[in-house]
Image (cartoon, rainbow, N blue to C red):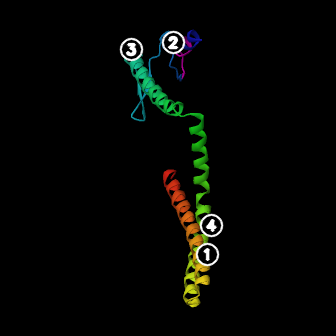
Amino acid sequence: MSNALSSWGKKDGAVIVVSHDKSFCDSVGFNTVGTVKDGSLVIEERELNDNDWRQYDMALSTAVESSNSELDKEIEKTPEQIEEEKKRRKMAFNAPKQIAKLEKKIEQAETKIAELDEEMMTVGNDVGKLTDISNLKLAEEKELDKMMKEWEELEMLLTEFS
């Protein structure tokens, strides 16, 4: 194939070849070289030289090292860690809906606690009723604390994955 390309290119016409195969490029004998530098294509009328291949080898080596570095990070994770991360991402995806639901429940719990406080004021000296209402209030406050902790965890999860 290199023979056909090298003889065809000497006639009227042009061939554009992208190759990283040094022996193929040497056998064709290209007289115009294009290289990418700083994101731009630079075209030069010249033959390939050893420096062209060194630049390619260095770029390839850098790309491989970068890729390997990312792979190493993934390889370092155990299957359990990967599964946990998937679970946390799913939770983060659903977090806005969960937060909205929690905020409504938190508001309802705060309203209930305020109602229980008012009820305690109206009971007067009835120790039995005060104890019952106080126990209801403590249970509601305990539930409110759990909801607040869950709300905080979801907010932190959203921050982690945004």
Pointer 1 local density, CA inside 10 Å: few below 14, some 14–19, many at least 20: some
- Residue for badge 4: 101
Q: CA distance from mark 2 to mark 1?
A: 89 Å
Q: Which residues are magenta?
A: 6-15
Q: What number of labels is visible?
A: 4
- In-image side of 39 versus 71 (left or right): left
Distance from Cα at disc 3 to Cα at disc 1: 84 Å
Tell me what residue is drawn at x 46 percent, y 28 percent: 63
Q: Earlier in the sequence, mark 1 or mark 4?
A: 4
User: Which residue is disc 2 drawn over?
Assistant: 28
Q: Nearer the viewer, mark 3 or mark 4?
A: 4
Amino acid type shown at disc 3: Asp
Earlier sequence position, callout 2 versus callout 1: 2
Of pointers 3 and 2, the one earlier in the residue sequence: 2
Please give the label number shown on residue 76.
none
Callout 3 secondary element: helix
Q: Position of residue 123 (x, y in %)?
A: 59, 89
- Residue 50 is marked as 3
- At label 2, the amino acid type is Val
Circle 3 residues within 10 Å: few <14, some 14–19, many ≥20? few
Disc on the earlier residue, 3 or 4? 3
Q: Position of residue 57 (x, y in %)?
A: 43, 20
Instruction: Answer with the quarter of the image where residue 140 lies.
Output: bottom right
Query: Which one is in front, 30 or 139?
Result: 139
Label 1 SS: helix
Where the N terminus falls, by quadrant? top right
Residue 136: mark? 1
Pick whichever of labels 3 and 1 is earlier in the sequence.
Answer: 3
Disc 4 vs disc 2: which is toward the camera? 4
Q: Are marks 3 and 2 in contact (CB under 8 Å)?
A: no
